[in-house]
Image (cartoon, grey):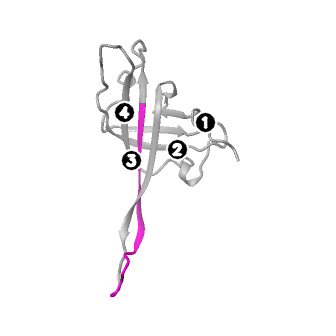
Amino acid sequence: MATLAHNRGWLTINGIDVRAAAISVEPDRSVELNDTTRGFGTDWTSNAAGLKSAKIKVMLAYTYDNEARLTDQGLTDVGETYRLVYGVEGNAANTPILDQDYILESVPSPKVDVKKTMTVWELSYTHKDAPHVGGDMYAGDKF
């Protein structure tokens, strides 16, 4: 069985390669549960799967002297839709792919201090629609 290479991730936001600035990427998939309990004398609830939901949190860091800023690239406008393409093992053939449109939900302002350390952006997204065809790693899709 192949070993997962956690440090070889692939990430683009609206086609802009942000791998060099990436600290972490945390995709999350969930499903709403619908209560289907019925019948007298029931001791347990019954549930059925409802609608799926997806979120993703991305942390990017830029050093003090790095001129490539997210704001300059137009990637921090809350409420806008962004296409994220993420590969947990890179983008080589037959590696998992997540290709989905997300709405940028929140972007706290980065902390700035006198030490001139890295500027860290934490971008939180919620899905807009289902993943693009062939872009759902949870369904087994691959690059």
| Image position of 5 (left or right of 48) | right
Q: In this view, does 22 lie above or below 40?
A: above
Name the residue at 63% across, 42% down.
95
Location of mark 4 (residue): 122
Location of mark 2 (residue): 98
Badge 1 or badge 2: first in the primary sequence: 1
Please tell me the numbered disc located at residue 91: 1
Q: Position of residue 66 (x, y in %)?
A: 43, 15
How far apart are the alpha carbons under marks 1 and 2? Answer: 10 Å
Amino acid at dot 4:
Glu
Q: In this view, does 83 lie above or below 20?
A: below
Please tell me the numbered disc located at residue 128: 3
Q: Where is residue 86 in the image (x, y as percent from the top left)?
A: 52, 39
Name the residue at 53% across, 49% down.
136
* Quarter containing the C terminus: top right
Q: What stretch is highlighted in magenta?
A: 40-59
Amino acid at dot 3:
Lys
Element type at mark 3: loop
Element type at mark 4: strand
Badge 3 or badge 1: first in the primary sequence: 1
Q: Is residue 53 above or below residue 107?
A: below
**Which of labels 3 and 4 is toward the front?**
4
